[in-house]
């Protein structure tokens, strides 16, 4: 069976590597893919992830037996709807269900309506009213653009001047385009953060191993927010008791709420959680696999990924036992200098052949001379699996040091908070 994966980053590379393990998997096509993914799949760089017409035409002309739509934009645009209309079995939510990420306002209102624990909030579509509200607010505070913004549409101003600048940037200067036409202003929750991805067919749910992301660009959680500089799994703060509480109060109620709204969610639902003194609360939902959480979660998946995805599509997930390996995984992101700001591209990448880790390719391409060169901010994800988190981190960092390209940048403290939590 030939498979199509829409997307071209590290998350998609992790999905493709896992799909390859199924003996039923024939040719895997990546649209558009990237230079490193080309080692594991047939890349079609001329078809972008948002080019729905050409994606559907490709799926039809190549008799695709199963498709996976991984990024948020094509999901929100209705790529799964279009593939289903063309008769292609597909993993991922339809456009109505993808609103749980594509609209922060929809998600917050859903949680309020169905009693799902989250931060107190207000919604604004007028910058003057938002600015007036800020004068009554406590700081720090969280300001979110309503729509998709490449993972960068959330700002946490520490004081009134910063908050006013954030509102003007999002709503008046359109820093995130039309995504900022509406904003959510909410209280800043405190506590350990946990990311939990979950397979769901709309009724049954199979949570994946928890993970801990590192969003800030610099060591010690300093600098601007990024798409993620590294991850570890499992997250030691996510104990069995916390997991049970989340299933009862957040996960299953969210699925029930989506069904009640007439948009049942099928695919991978991402729960961004804060473990507050008042219990777990939802910071955000994503309608797809997280990046780079996927790069540490899927290596620990014991059950075949294609089988799980087909069970989600066929709504038989409740009949399947999804199993996981023990141990830990750690991913260190290698970024281009200047990320998340402007970065120079076209720098040659050297990766030793004997690395005892998995290297997931995100922002690279093959140059005309066949060499692998940088093409984006986050270039590679270096993932190691070990018996302990300490072992996984040691191996990931040792490999990351041996990979070279001009301007290579990485954080050097990925996983340190998790190690302290384990010791404490």
Image (spheres, rainbow, N blue to C red):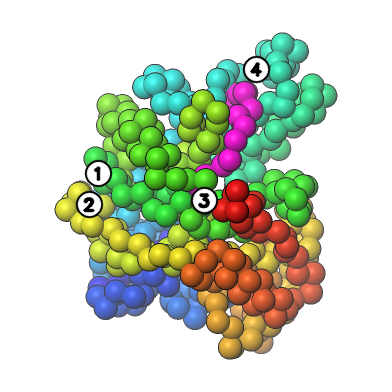
Residue 163, visible in the rendered structure: yes
Compared across the picture, whether 63 is left or right of 390 comes to left
What residue would you read off at disc 3? 236
Which circle's residue, 3 or 2, is located before the other in the chain? 3
Residue 284 location in percent, x, y? 51, 36
Disc 4 is placed on an element classified as: loop
Q: In the rendered image of this protein, does residue 165 appear above or below residue 23?
A: above
**Magenta residues, start to end:** 184-195
Disc 3 is placed on an element classified as: loop
Picture disc at residue 317: 2
Mark 1 crowdedness (10 Å alpha carbons): few <14, some 14-19, many ≥20: some
What residue would you read off at disc 4? 126
Q: Disc 4 and disc 1: Cα gap in Å? A: 40 Å
Do the residues bearing badges 3 and 4 touch, measured as CB atoms within 8 Å? no
Residue 386 location in percent, x, y? 51, 71
Image quadrant in which you'd find residue 77: top left
Which circle's residue, 1 or 3, is located before the other in the chain? 1
Q: In the rendered image of this protein, does residue 75 appear above or below residue 294?
A: above
Residue at 45% x, 65% y: name it: 327
Do the residues bearing badges 2 and 4 touch, measured as CB atoms within 8 Å? no
What residue would you read off at disc 1? 204
Do the residues bearing badges 2 and 1 touch, measured as CB atoms within 8 Å? yes
């Amino acid at each position: 069976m030939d498979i199509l994966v829409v997307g071209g980053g590290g998350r998609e590379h992790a999905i493709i590597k896992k799909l390859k393990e199924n003996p039923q998997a024939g040719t895997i096509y990546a649209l558009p893919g990237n230079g490193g993914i080309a080692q594991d799949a047939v890349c079609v760089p001329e078809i972008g992830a948002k080019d729905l017409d050409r994606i559907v035409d490709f799926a039809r002309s190549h008799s695709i037996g199963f498709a996976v739509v991984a990024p948020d934009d094509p999901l929100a645009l209705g790529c799964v709807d279009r593939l289903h209309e063309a008769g292609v079995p597909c993993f991922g939510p339809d456009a109505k269900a993808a609103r749980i990420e594509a609209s922060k306002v929809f998600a917050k209102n859903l949680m309020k309506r169905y009693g799902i624990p989250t931060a107190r909030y207000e919604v604004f579509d007028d910058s003057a009213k938002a600015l007036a509200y800020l004068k009554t607010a406590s700081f720090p505070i969280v300001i979110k653009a309503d729509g998709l913004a490449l993972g960068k549409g959330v700002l946490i101003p520490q004081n009134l001047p910063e908050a006013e600048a954030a509102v003007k940037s999002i709503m008046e200067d359109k820093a995130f385009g039309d995504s900022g036409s509406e904003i959510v202003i909410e209280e800043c929750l405190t506590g350990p953060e946990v990311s939990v991805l979950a397979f769901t067919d709309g009724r049954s749910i199979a949570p994946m191993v928890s993970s801990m992301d590192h969003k800030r660009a610099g060591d010690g959680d300093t600098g601007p927010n990024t798409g993620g500089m590294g991850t570890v799994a499992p997250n030691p703060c996510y104990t069995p008791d916390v997991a049970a509480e989340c299933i009862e109060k957040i996960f299953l109620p969210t699925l029930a709420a989506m069904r009640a709204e007439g948009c049942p969610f099928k695919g991978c639902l991402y729960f961004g959680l804060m473990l507050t003194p008042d219990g777990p609360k939802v910071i955000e939902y994503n309608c797809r696999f997280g990046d780079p959480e996927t790069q540490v979660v899927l290596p620990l998946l014991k059950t075949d990924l294609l089988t799980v995805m087909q069970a989600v599509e066929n709504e038989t997930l409740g009949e399947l036992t999804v199993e996981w390996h023990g141990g830990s995984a750690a991913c260190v992101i290698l970024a281009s200098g200047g990320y998340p700001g402007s970065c120079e591209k076209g720098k040659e990448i050297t990766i030793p052949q004997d690395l005892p880790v998995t290297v997931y390719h995100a922002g690279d391409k093959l140059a005309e001379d066949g060499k692998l060169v940088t093409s984006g901010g986050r270039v590679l994800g270096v993932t190691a699996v070990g018996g302990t988190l300490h072992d996984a981190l040691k191996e990931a960092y040792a490999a990351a040091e041996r990979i070279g390209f001009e301007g290579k940048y990485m954080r050097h403290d990925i996983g340190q908070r998790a190690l302290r939590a384990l010791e404490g």
